[in-house]
């Protein structure tokens, strides 16, 4: 299994509080991604990173920010959590860019509930 | 915005039956990936198809990429309870540029339940 660790795995928080999810990889892969998974929507890309300090927005980036200060760590921050951000968040990594037939390796997910 | 329509959304069948899951789009993709996800885990790649008309087989699973690279199908022969899970298709398009990033667009998923 690819070495991807997400933390925390479960979190319950209140509306308006900041939340940070962490993704740690031991594969030294260049690309890292944050997705959210909601029923009926599949996986939707929030942000991705193509190198240290190199990040860009995905299709559902509003309300989220990311940082990547080291190859192995990719942080997802919700500055002020809202109930619409209740979801399961997946981190993924790939050695090559996703469109270049690069396989994505996913973490086990972080379930976030915003009350 | 590129969309991938996956159908059916839910599929409940008996062990031994055959089934097909479809993944359709109006957009052309450079490649198409199929993932399987079990409860509480992340998706795992089953196969990648790249060439229009390509057919790949993985034991009882057959994957096909449409000639125009806009659609794909997954066919399972003689389904078993171990096939139960969420199946996701994902189409890749090349963004290129300095990021060398290929965007993956995921379908909504098909929840398959195979009853013994």
Image: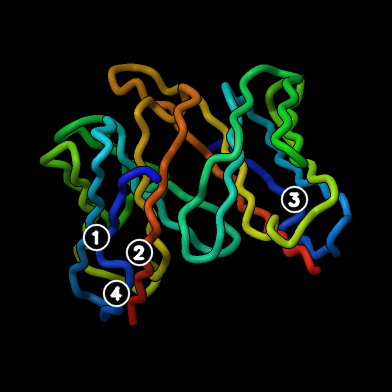
Furthest-right residue in view? B17
**Circle 2 — which element?**
strand
* Same chain? Circles 3 and 4: no
Query: x%, y% of residue B98?
Result: 28, 18
Residue at left offset 46%, top offset 49%: A44
Q: Is residue A113 left or right of residue B44?
A: left
**C-beta proximity under 8 Å, tags 1 and 4:** yes
Q: In which chain is the residue bearing label 4?
A: A
Q: Which residue is mark 3?
A: B7
**Eyeballing the image, is A73 above or below B91?**
below
Which of label 3 and label 2 is nearer to you?
Answer: 2
Q: CA distance from mark 3 to mark 1?
A: 32 Å
* Same chain? Circles 3 and 2: no
**Circle 1 — which element?**
strand
* Same chain? Circles 4 and 2: yes
Q: Which residue is mark 4?
A: A11
Q: Which residue is mark 2?
A: A110
Q: In which chain is the residue bearing label 3?
A: B
**Eyeballing the image, is A45 above or below A96?**
below
**C-beta proximity under 8 Å, tags 1 and 2:** yes
Res B85 quadrant in image: bottom right
Residue at left offset 19%, top offset 41%: A72
């Amino acid at each position: 299994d690819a070495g991807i660790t997400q933390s925390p795995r479960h979190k319950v928080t209140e509306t308006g509080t900041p939340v940070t999810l962490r993704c740690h990889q031991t594969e030294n892969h260049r690309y890292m991604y944050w997705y959210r998974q909601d029923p009926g929507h599949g996986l939707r890309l929030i942000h991705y990173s193509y190198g240290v300090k190199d990040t860009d927005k995905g299709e559902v980036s509003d309300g989220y920010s990311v940082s990547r200060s080291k190859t192995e760590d990719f942080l997802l921050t919700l500055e002020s959590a809202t109930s619409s951000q209740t979801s399961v968040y997946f981190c993924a990594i790939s050695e090559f860019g996703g469109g270049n037939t690069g396989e994505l390796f996913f973490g086990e997910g972080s379930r976030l509930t915003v009350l | 915005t590129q969309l991938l329509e996956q159908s059916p959304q839910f599929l409940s069948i008996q062990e031994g039956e055959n089934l097909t899951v479809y993944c359709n789009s109006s957009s052309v993709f450079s490649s198409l990936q199929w993932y399987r996800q079990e409860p509480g885990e992340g998706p795992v790649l089953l196969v990648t198809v790249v060439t229009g008309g390509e057919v790949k087989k993985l034991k009882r699973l057959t994957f096909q990429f449409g000639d125009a690279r806009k659609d794909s199908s997954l066919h399972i022969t003689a389904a078993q309870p171990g096939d139960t899970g969420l199946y996701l298709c994902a189409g890749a398009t090349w963004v290129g540029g300095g990021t060398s990033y290929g965007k993956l667009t995921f379908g909504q998923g098909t929840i398959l339940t195979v009853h013994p």
